[in-house]
């Protein structure tokens, strides 16, 4: 079995850094009310090797430390860590193998996103924030059982039809989000819950007005290329 | 009257430990928004004697200390403690006497779980998280008045028909949850509110899709035997 | 004009104590999400003189100190304090003059209680927690403009028809609660919002089942006479 | 290009003060749950020069410092600051140029206010709190793309028809609020979300009762001229 000692100092340094980042980002899941108890996880792929860092399975958020984060290869084999990795490890690994631009993956069961997932309905694109972040509706993916890479395949297959969209609502299950790093995927998870809640609320008091596809395209283009610090 | 001084040092040591655990776990009830003011309680049964540790009655959460936790026997008689025990003590005791694998009991009035309880509807099993934690729907139990062991009997009788399920929604009242220790019961209370909220939200925007019984069984089996750190 | 220096040392000591209590209890309004910005107030009547202590008008909760609390007589005239008292002062004073057992009054605009108030509907008694705390439905009071004692009169007149109930939902406005001291009134305010939210949620997924009047009476009697530390 | 060094010491002192105020007020956006991640911004116009201070673009709230706030002129040109200003800068600037009494502007995507914006419905005036703060319904403004001053023009044009109202719900987008300073605009943002949530909730359980226009006028007049510390 391969161990972290077999990797270069550069890789080991990145592992140390990413462990801190991934551990810290779990606090953002609770900060934005995206998770209850242990029901969500963050991973980040390394730049310097085909490895990823992911949350250990079934550990409460207040007990997470950088050292408890598990390092696996992109087939989900543990390379370093005293704890068993998240039950979703094989799915995170599948996503990294099949989406080369993705370096961060997040899974939650956030309340309103999961409500949409339970009904099997895409969240319609009726908010400028959705045009910005998702470039269209947030799609529902297939029903898959946890424990294999099937959920990861469902995420990848669904996103093929929604280029640029960082979120999938896995049916009866909850959202998976991806990004250029773990922070971007956490942000997408927070945005997914926010738009899920807002559009849900809008449907209770009327019919949300759709945004024209041309306007959605303009919003998404500006957001991806102009917004923020460059 | 029996007092704690009549018990062995081993029992007194466990009492001290469990008082700390039970006092600390009440902070998780407020952490996950499961209670308002004093409206919820946690107990844990001892391993070393037929005793349990439970919250005092009507005391605000910020005033709880390990020393204020009340020790009773499994008929609800106070063995140690300066305060009166929770109004639900006889029901906790009944559950421990009739469910020998249960060492933790929690009662809350959490908002969405209690909303289901008010309508008398079971929460249908439409989320993988429900398959994991509950192995099926979350059932409603009978209407019973507080103050006797009747509520405990309602919980036990209802769970006989739902083996493996750790939660009952007592009609017009609120959820009771059980577990292998108090922490497991608190986790079940947090999960009960989360799925109650999510399925409630799903019903406002469509028809939640049921999960096949065979898939529910697979989810529950994996969660009980594979998930977490073993 | 009368000033606090005209009162006995005993009264001045009680003023000091009650100012601390009332200032501290405002933190419970934000703790339980009952208020936004400055939109709620707590007062307590003194035992040693016909005086009350109330929040200053329009001051943000994080800026409140015991010293900023205003002392008025039971006609609402300022006896001590550098700031103008709450706009609701005359109504608090009216309640104290007409309900001799009441020593605490709280007003909020808490979200779900105010939603019921906007529709003019009483909250039906479908939860054991309502039987405990309110002894029946939470009633709606008349529409009255702020600034005079009219709101206080509306509260008193409405509670005459609901003996033992500590809450009124003033129409299009928000809840007022009363108690044996300010803490009891704050507790009633927290309970009012909780049951308003829960019954509201129940109505979205079915028809909440009423509790028999005889059972409500038993719940209320036990709660008022047995619950808590005696 | 003009720089801050070209301005008088008085202006530079005010810039320093307003940077602290604006940075601090962003914490109130998260305090009252008005924003997720980076999705909201506060600005304040100076009294001593035709300048404004605004949030940098796409920076997380916990990373904001007074020094990171950007100073621009009232055409949106950067005068001082290491970061790019908010994407909404041109719209804030437009509002300041066209509403001379406005010295504070806030934009959020707060959940329930944005839900109303998605449906294109004004929030009807059915709460005394709305009479106080808004003097009538909260109006919906036009759909406009972000990045130019078009949103600011939509805000100004909409408020022309609602004198005294400090909030507009930009269609499919979210609320903009204005005030005599940034704190007043933040307060209006918090109040907008609160009344959006309350009226939304009221519509789920009945028909909110309208308040008579004469009563709304009385409420608004008292609130603007009597409420608070004068």
Image (cartoon, coloured by chain):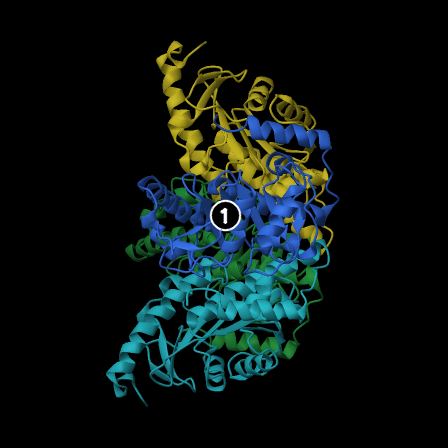
Chain colours: A yellow, B blue, C cyan, D green
**Secondary structure of residue under mark 1:** loop
Is D213 on the left or on the right of A88, as rendered?
right
Instruction: List x then y, in percent, for residue A140.
Output: 69, 34
Task: Give the chain of mark 1.
Answer: B
For image coordinates 40% across by 73% down, the residue present is C56
Q: Quadrant of the N terminus of chain B?
A: bottom left
Which of the pair B34/A178 is nearer the observer? B34
Task: Report the residue that reaches farthest toward the bottom.
Answer: C1
For image coordinates 65% across by 42% down, the residue present is B160
Instruction: List x then y, in percent, for residue A10.
Output: 37, 15
Q: Which residue is mark 1?
A: B32
Q: Residues within 10 Å of mark 1 (few under 14, many from 20)?
A: many
Q: Is residue D160 above or below residue A121?
A: below
Quarter of the image holding residue A217? top right
Q: Is residue B58 above or below residue B17?
A: below
Which of the pair A136/C116 is nearer the observer? C116
Q: Is residue A165 above or below residue C111?
A: above
Instruction: List x then y, in percent, for residue D79.
Output: 40, 46
Which of the pair B219/A131 is nearer the observer? B219
Is D213 on the left or on the right of B42, as rendered?
right
For image coordinates 71% across by 53% down, the residue present is C205
Quarter of the image holding residue D210? bottom right
For image coordinates 61% across by 71% down, the residue present is C217
The answer to whether residue D141 is visible is no
């Amino acid at each position: 079995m391969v161990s972290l000692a077999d990797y270069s100092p550069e890789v080991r340094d990145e592992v140390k850094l990413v462990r801190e980042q991934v551990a810290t980002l779990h606090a953002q899941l609770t900060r934005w009310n995206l998770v209850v108890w242990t029901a969500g996880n963050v991973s980040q792929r390394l730049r310097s090797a085909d490895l990823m860092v992911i949350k250990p399975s079934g550990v409460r958020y207040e007990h997470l430390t950088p050292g408890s984060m598990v390092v696996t290869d992109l087939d989900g084999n543990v390379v370093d860590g005293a704890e068993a990795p998240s039950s979703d490890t094989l799915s995170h690994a599948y996503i990294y193998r099949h989406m080369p631009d993705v370096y961060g993956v997040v899974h939650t069961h956030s309340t309103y996103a999961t409500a949409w997932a339970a009904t099997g309905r895409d969240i319609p694109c009726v908010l400028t924030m959705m045009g910005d972040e998702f470039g269209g509706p947030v799609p529902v993916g297939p029903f898959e059982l946890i424990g294999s890479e099937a959920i990861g395949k469902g995420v990848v297959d669904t996103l093929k039809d929604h280029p640029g969209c960082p979120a999938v609502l896995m049916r009866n299950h909850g959202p998976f989000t991806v990004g250029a790093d773990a922070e971007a995927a956490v942000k997408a998870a927070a945005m997914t819950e926010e738009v899920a809640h807002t559009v849900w609320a809008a449907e209770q008091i009327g019919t949300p007005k759709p945004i024209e596809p041309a306007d959605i395209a303009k919003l998404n283009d500006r957001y991806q290329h102009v917004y923020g610090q460059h």
